[in-house]
Image (tube, helix red, strand yellow):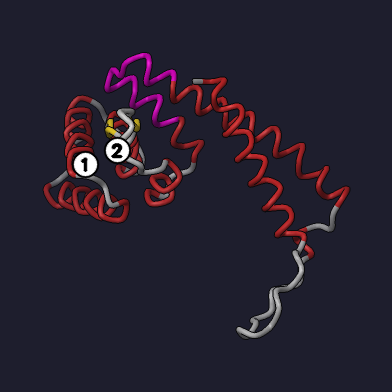
Amino acid sequence: MGLSEEGEDNVEKRFEDLCLELNMDQSAKEEAWEHYERINTNYTLEGDTIHWLACALYHACRRTVIPTVGRGVIEGNCVSLTRLLRSAKLSLLQFFNKMKKWADMANFAQEFRDKVDRLERNFAVSTVIFKKFEPIFLDIFKNPADDPPKQVRSRKQRRLPCTPSDVFNFCWTMFVQVKGTFLGGLFK
């Protein structure tokens, strides 16, 4: 099932807009578009086309290697998965589902597939931990949903004390940061 000229132009415009929003580098953008065109000619891509293009962009972004001052390299072009998914309006679960299919269609190397699998496992573990964290937090602190709305303050007013939402967000963010810092080295 091919796209009409008008449909293809619309897809290309949406892709251009996505890349512009992400401040995507030209080489990753071109590589992703070439992969998309090749896959699209050989397979029927169901669902929102921009989601498939997000998979192509993710792969192109992760293949980029940037040299650093200390003779090391940064893998990826610094476009985060979170920003990519948010801009493409794609949930993380949808991404994992489509990325596996995209990897099969594009015949990606096993090393890249393993990285995506590891990312999915880490997400699953974090989800389980979050489901445990929430009830424990509610046993100790007030429910963040019961917070009164924040009042608009003038510049001279003192900072209000932390709300339960502030404490909840701080604790979870700190956990994620510590987990990434200390356990991140175990999985590399």
Q: Is residue 97 left or right of residue 135?
A: left
Answer with left or right where residue 179 lies relative to residue 98: right
How many other residues sit within 10 Å of disc 2, few (<14), some (14-19) or many (≥20)? many
Q: How far from the left and from the top, in percent, is residue 134?
A: 76, 44
Secondary structure beneath disc 1?
A: helix
Task: Write down the residue under mark 2.
Answer: 57
Q: Are marks 2 and 1 in contact (CB under 8 Å)?
A: yes
Q: Position of residue 63 (x, y in %)?
A: 29, 28
Vertically, is 158 above or below 71? below
Indicate whether 146 appears above or below 111.
below
Q: Nearer the viewer, residue 43 or 22?
A: 22
Q: Is residue 99 magenta?
A: yes
Identify which residue, 129 or 94, lies in the foreground.
129
User: Which residue is at 36% across, 44% downward?
Assistant: 79
State the SS at label 2.
Answer: helix
Query: Which quadrant of the structure image shows residue 130?
Result: top right
Q: In the image, what residue occupies the spot 81% across and 44% down?
A: 135
Lateral position of residue 130 relative to residue 32, left or right: right
Measured from the top left, where is residue 169 in percent x and y?
Answer: 67, 53
Which residue: 48% across, 22% down? 117
Q: Quadrant of residue 53?
A: top left
Q: Earlier in the sequence, mark 2 or mark 1?
A: 1
Q: Which residue is at the far right?
A: 139
Determine which of the numbered discs, if any, sits on residue 29 in the image.
Answer: 1
Give the number of marks: 2
Residue type at mark 2: give it: Leu
Magenta region, residue range: 97-114
Residue 181: x %, y % from top left: 58, 33
